[in-house]
Amino acid sequence: MAEYTPAALAVQLLATLGRDKARLTRIDDYFHGRHDDPYMPAQADDEYRLLAKRAVSNWAPLLVNTPSQALYVDGYRAGSEVGRGTATDLASPQWRHWQRSRLDARQSAVYKGALTYGHSFTLTERVKGVVLTKGLSALRTSALYEDPANDDTPHAALTVVTWPVGEKAGRARMWDGRLEYAVTFKGLDDSDSVTVGKGKRHGAAECPVTRFAASVDLEGRTVGLVEPMIPLQNRINQTVFDLLLAQSYGSTKVRTVTGMAPPVQRDPETGEVVYDEQGNPIPLPINHNAKRFLFAEDPDVRFGSLDETPLQGFIDSIDMSVRHLSAIAQVPPHAMLGQIANLSAEALQAAEISLSRMIQEFRTAFGEAWERVFRLAAELEGALGAEDFTGEVIWRDMEQRSLAQSADALGKLREQLGIPAKGLWKRVPNVTQTELDEWDDLADEEDSVGQLASALTRATPEPITAEPLPAAA
């Protein structure tokens, strides 16, 4: 990328936000249930519009939450080049940075942002002498790359702190490979209003903003889980709207009567029929409901009924659309429809294979991003690991297995394959990094006690047993 002035970079980054604003806002609306109205007649009344609002069946949060709830970083294993290639350590600077930044809880927002909009960001910086990492929203942040499809280090990045309101200018922060700048602007497309303050060193050797992308193609475009599902979501909403219309207006039998004239108003004094301005008799209101019935003395009166509109077709159509959504989004049907009756463990596992593969893809992409965050934090703290490209994050095993099944499988791995016991600890279900470190300390203590006992045994001389004297003759 050619060298740009800070002002030119700020203009380009703000313009990128402006270009993507409409698309990201539409994705944000669909994620939060603000969908397009289904088709309805132009003369639709308020009752129609109320049914249209009730027809919104928002599946987008489920599409995002299902894989994101299986993404949880549980530890970090530094590379062998910094001397920690065998296990994680809560005392390592990388994991201290993680805990200090409260990323145990905050990591979920980073994943959900990336899965919703296609990408999200983190910022690693020194705050009051402490290095912290926090998430940045895709709605407020943009980054420039020399090769957006392959580079993990941005050339420059900008995040909006406050949006402009009236005549009051908005504020933003911008970073390049060496400096941080304060930016003010009055509009995303108003290049003349952009001003950039004097830069100050941010302390890292590269831009401290890291991108978390759910999926990046060779053109550098990022795609999340919500945008491709919008047409299917609209189809479901339309079908639900049609179902509500049929349910409200045609789901009950209509009783009919012919040959019966309603009673008319009469003058209370003369008893004569009262007519309206057009010369028609004015009918009296009929108090008729489900508790009442009509009868007629005239034999020419005919009673009948109109059948209700069947609703099963609408229900089947909704079910089919949800299954299509499930297949395209790689979310198991039982997770969306709640139909898990009479399913064996093997059937459930087969249904979740596609989801597991998608989650593994996300773990690979997000794991690379976290490793860059750890390298940035180590560099800012002056600790080992700034050039550690062999470290890796450890993802929690979220598969539901009983402790007995896991113990049996781990025991077989230990006995039949000779895998060291410590190497299998991290595969115990729901074990935390704190417990792993505690087990490691206890194992070292037991080993020390065993070595001491063995040394004492070797140092103790064997007792001398006297041979018996020969008996007297």
Image (cartoon, rainbow, N blue to C red):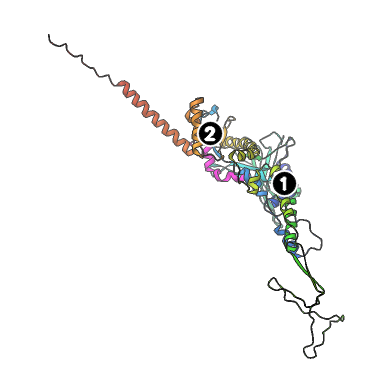
Q: Decide: is 5 above or below 162.
A: above
Name which residue type carries label 1.
Met
Q: Nearer the viewer, residue 379 or 227?
A: 227
Q: Which residues are magenta?
A: 87-111
Q: Decide: is 221 above or below 278.
A: above
Give the mark nearer the N terminus: 2 vs 1: 1
> Which residue is labeled 1 in the image?
229
Residue 407 placement (x, y as % from top left): 49, 34
- Residue furthest top as drawn: 473
Q: Quadrant of residue 343?
A: top right
- Residue 134 within the segment the image draws in magenta: no
Residue 190 placement (x, y as % from top left): 76, 50
Q: Residues within 10 Å of mark 1 (few under 14, many from 20)?
A: some
> Which residue is labeled 2 in the image?
383
Would residue 431 be visible to someone looking at this image? no
Residue under the point 41% across and 30% down: 444
